[in-house]
Amino acid sequence: MMTSPISSLLVANRGEIAVRIFRTARDLGLTTVAVHSDPDADALHVRAADAAVRLPGAAPADTYLRGDLIIKAALAAGADAVHPGYGFLSESADFARQVQDSGLTWIGPPPEAIEAMASKTRAKDLMRAAGVPLLAPVDPAAATPADLPLLLKAAAGGGGRGMRVVRDLDALEEALHAASAEAASAFGDGEVFAEPYVERGRHVEVQILADAHGTVWALGTRDCSLQRRHQKVIEEAPAPGLPDTLRERLHTAAVAAARAVSYRGAGTVEFLVTADGRPYFLEMNTRLQVEHPVTEAVFGLDLVALQLRVAEGAALPPSPPAPTGHAVEARLYAEDPAQDWRPQTGVLHTLDIPGRVRVDTGFTGGDTVGVHYDPMLAKVVAHAPTRAEAVRTLAHALAGARIHGLTTNRELLVGSLRHPDFTAGQLDTGFYDRHLTTLTQAAPDAGTAALAAALAEAAPAQDAPLAARLGGWRNLRSQPQTRRYTTAGTEYEVQYHPVDHPGVRVLAAERHLVTLEVDGIRRMFHVKRNSNNTEVYVDSPLGSHTLTPVPRFPDPQDRTEPGSLLAPMPGTVVRVAEGLTPGTAVTAGQPLLWLEAMKMEHRILAPASGTLTALHAVTGQQVEFGALLAVVQEEPLS
């Protein structure tokens, strides 16, 4: 394989993966080119590139999924190579061919390999022929109770879209319809297949890297079992607790899978490992994975640099370097795990993650998280000589992070990393099914956080007159003052005094830092208000709290009609329940509408049994947060 050296690289992606690829490209002396939609005009990946080309529009279908516009942008900017990152067009064989046909170097596997693995059903046939272990498929039309539970999966695409678990044959037909509709919407292909659903299985994968000269590396294992909605949350390398014989079997199967399709570049072969240690092929991702940093950390490699060198025709050494230590990655999402993982949008006022960790992100403080794209804010990675140390380091860094402006899954990540099952390496895909309730309990000591917020609010500003600042607390009125805040649905009324509080002694109080002695232990509380003073953020070793000051005179018009269904986030109405019209009788919990936001589909359920008295939503409609979608009049109790 003979190719010309790369001098200028366009990344056909956005966010943290574009920023991460640009970092390596700069280290290799390459000129970098970004593409961006209109909402991303000022995004970090645009600011990180040497040049940027606008893709007019906002929705992915009009921008990052327009291969023709991306190739046109690459040629106009003088790029000679295209890296697709992951997601969007990264696994499109057609796009790979178009890039090559345009005279550009494609940083990825051959289009034929992408095509071979694009359909999970066809990929399984190839793997069966290559001797890779597989789960036996199940014909949904012939399924019996003995086949339950079943897992329905989209034949095209991934990321948990078009996936359903079926435990009751009576629910199979509706689940097939829903999975197919979601797959068609997400990937343009509604094909769905069924296979046995393995309870408490582990999701284990093998990173591979292959060149054009016959060398294929198996770069160890990763465990990605902690998932929400079939999407990964915490990943680590190597997968803990696997016998050496099983590791070797996984490596051998992954190499066989790569050779079966004449693979080239970076890819991942994913397996399901049963509780008794039997591995089964799931799929092959013909691209770089989100979790690739843990493999980089353990092997001391830069996989993006290796992708670029392989694309230039370089040969890999006969074998990879030896792995050292353990690495763990946590995906920090703008979402609320306690509210069905509801994605969050808005301004990210602060993103500060301290400690000895790697942070890959597409955001900085002040950036806006929009509705059109995945809600991942950052990937945080810790590497250490042992698993216990890596897990402890990552949990400590996340616990000490300051993340203001949006609800995130940070507390869930910290709780997961410190959970006894996780620290013991007892991992499986049902982890959050069992532990979500305890992991999403409100952070403790919200009352103390509210006290710190009130004291900071009353502290003299740094630009106050000198006499006021020197007088400190002695200049405050002697009578207690009152402030009220809400957090996590609970209201706290704080009566604060300069010195005296039950169990608490005020040691110092400034606008942004309050030091309290709580039950004999000194604690520091960092306090920050957002720019319009609508929220107060309090961070301390006791946890992080977002407090909303309660106005003295609430707006009496801030009410909605009983039974109103409001949009829980901005998004697009992708489906309305069949036959749903005003006057329709509905039952509590019945799905009425499906709303898509930030690459996830959310069901809007009837809040009670009764009659639908109004329906304002239609398929394809863009709605804002809080928009009135429908109204259900509850049946009176007899």
Image (cartoon, rainbow, N blue to C red):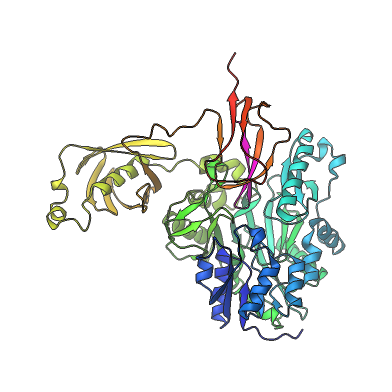
Residue at left offset 60%, top offset 20%: 635
Indicate left or right for 427 with 410 as reference. right
Is residue 390 shown above or below 312?
above
**Which part of the image, by quadrant, shows the N terminus?**
bottom right
Magenta residue span: 594-607
Location of residue 359 in the rendering, given as x and y in whole percent from the top left corner:
50, 64
Along the line of sight, the residue nearer the viewer: 541 or 101: 101
Estimate the x, y position of residue 558 in percent, counting from the top left: 43, 34
**Does the magenta portion include 507?**
no
Residue 456, position in %: x, y? 27, 49
Most common secondary structure along the magenta stretch: strand
| Nearer to us in this view, 84 or 423 | 84
- Rendered location of residue 431, percent (x, y): 61, 46
Q: Which of the 4 quarters of the picture holds residue 320?
A: bottom right
The residue closer to the viewer here, 468 or 455, is 468
Q: Is residue 599 left or right of residue 110?
A: left
Q: Is residue 276 visible?
A: no
**Is residue 630 found left or right of 402 in the rendered image?**
right
Residue at (61%, 62%) from the top-left corner?
291
